[in-house]
Image (spheres, rainbow, N blue to C red):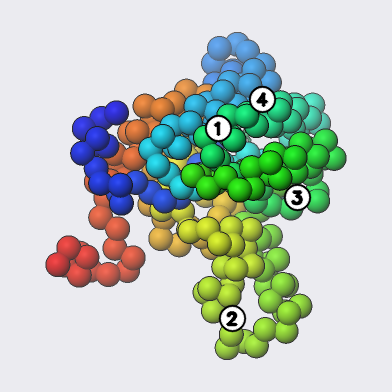
Amino acid sequence: MGDALSSSTPAAVPAHIAIIMDGNGRWAQRRGLSRSEGHRAGTRAAKAVVIRARELGVRHLTLYTFSRENWSRPKEEVGLIFDLLVEYMKGELQNLLDQDIRLRVLGDFDGLPFIARQSLSHVMGKTENCRAMTLNLALNYSGREEILRACRNLVAKGVKPEDVTDQAFAAELYTAGQPDPDLIIRTSGELRLSNYLLFQAAYAEFYFTDTLWPDFDAGELDRALAEYQGRQRRFGKTGEQVTG
Ligand code: FPP
């Protein structure tokens, strides 16, 4: 752990980190490996980052695992990603329980393949009382769809226009009951949000790195946190208002 982290107060650790895990394909290509190998290595990186986030005291970790747009990838690749997900669920259940980590899914759950729904439901059920950290997997997820769904829910409930508040809206999002992300990390040098947590990202700090996702390890997460801790978060206020 670097100095910036070891000297930090617990309050400086972001309560919620959201990650766009990008670059599995390029990582594999650079090594002359198949995209499948890239996703396999990406899954190993995800495991390491979950452990590190938990160690650091992060309360919510969200991983962009499969976007609604990802369905347009070749069928074999989509199949492999869900195979890896099911493998991850089988292999990690005990670790999640041991580390008191609750699993949640953000996204259109019913649109996921049956086998994925089955294994996710099993792990979500088993870990539902875990409290140290919530691991959200964004699956079949679209930020715009999430916002439209929230609008539809409010309309269906007959909520009056004046009662459509920030809180009422947030309660209809997949992240209901969880804080907004403080820090959003994207790997592989891409500088986009790609339909990720559009409503929740309002005041998030962004951290971009050229590191490809399979190479993103505990040390990389520490670096992202050290940079986050050096930032001044203003939430629309002036610098004097924040420091004074
Ligand atoms: C991004 O790399 C990765 C994905 C779209 C998907 C899947 C993520 C994993 C398999 C890792 C985490 C898995 C679990 C089970 C938690 P890319 O394919 O877009 O890379 P490229 O832009 O270099 O082609």
Please tell me how crowded label 4 is: few (under 14), some (14-19), or many (20+) other residues with Cα within 10 Å: few
Quarter residue 112 falls in = top right
* Residue 6, x across and y down, in percent: 24, 35
Callout 1 amino acid: Asp
Disc 3 designates what residue?
A: 109
Disc 2 designates what residue?
A: 164
Mark 3 vs 2, N-terminal side: 3
Of helix, strand and loop, which one carries label 3?
helix
Question: From what the image shows, is residue 111 above or below residue 217?
Answer: below
Q: Are marks 3 and 4 in contact (CB under 8 Å)?
A: no
The answer, for residue 81, to whether it is visible in the render is no
In the image, is 68 to the left or to the right of 48? Answer: right
Mark 2 vs 4, N-terminal side: 4
Mark 2 vs 1, N-terminal side: 1
Of helix, strand and loop, which one carries label 2?
loop
Residue at the spot 63% in from the left edge and 21% down from the top edge: 40
Mark 3 vs 1, N-terminal side: 1
Disc 4 designates what residue?
A: 91
Mark 3 vs 4, N-terminal side: 4
* Residue 32, x across and y down, in percent: 60, 11
Disc 1 designates what residue?
A: 98
The answer, for residue 161, to whether it is visible in the render is yes
Question: From what the image shows, is residue 97 above or below residue 68?
Answer: above
Mark 4 vs 1, N-terminal side: 4
Q: Are marks 3 and 2 in contact (CB under 8 Å)?
A: no
Q: Are marks 2 and 4 in contact (CB under 8 Å)?
A: no
